[in-house]
Amino acid sequence: MSEQIKIHNALNEPISQKAYERAELLNLTPQQRTIYELSFFHSQDRRLAIETAVEEKKIEIAKNVILSGLDDDLIVSVIGLPLEIVVQLRNELKK
């Protein structure tokens, strides 16, 4: 394998790509860095909001199927909530 191919392959490794991205961040002006950070935090906030909404919907669905009499193990396997959460929900619904 030629030296150029080895270098090309090394530069395409994920760790090399990450290093390149970080080096690019170091070259940003203060204004560009602020814009980048605001954009990054905004995307993280959106991701977290989506994850929270999905979990809340799973809990809502779990409550409905608990009330309809489904088994805990089936709820866990279909909805994907941990068994502890399903048991906790079932106990709360009994009150």
Image: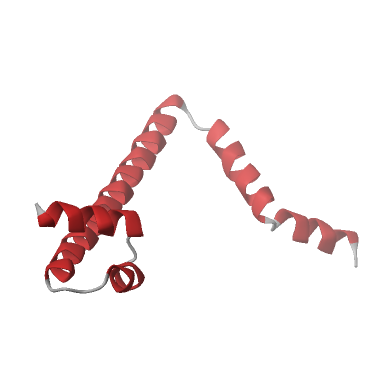
- As drawn, 68 above or below 48: below
Residue at x 63%, y 51% (from the top left corner): 17
Q: Between residues 12 and 93, which one lies in front from this camera angle?
A: 93
Q: How many marks?
A: 0
**Residue 72 drawn at (x, y percent):** 28, 68
Toward the left, the furthest residue is: 95
Q: In the image, 50: left or right of 41? A: left
Residue 72 sits above or below residue 48 on the image: below
Furthest-top residue in this view: 30
Q: Quadrant of residue 8?
A: bottom right
Residue 13 picture location, percent across and down: 70, 56
Left or right: where does residue 60 sit relative to residue 26? Answer: left
The residue under the point 25% across, 48% down is 49
- Residue 27 visible in the shown view: no
Q: Residue at x 35, y 41 (%)?
A: 39
Quarter of the rendering containing residue 67: bottom left
Q: Which quadrant would the N terminus be assigned to in this image?
A: bottom right
> What residue is drawn where x is 32% and y is 50%?
47
Task: Report the side of 77 relative to 2 (left or right).
Answer: left
In this view, the residue in front, 32 or 64, is: 64
Q: x, y percentage for residue 12?
A: 69, 58
* Colour convention of the picture: secondary structure
Name the residue nearer the viewer: 73 or 64. 73
Determine the image quadrant of residue 61: bottom left
Regarding residue 83, the answer to whether it shows in the image is yes
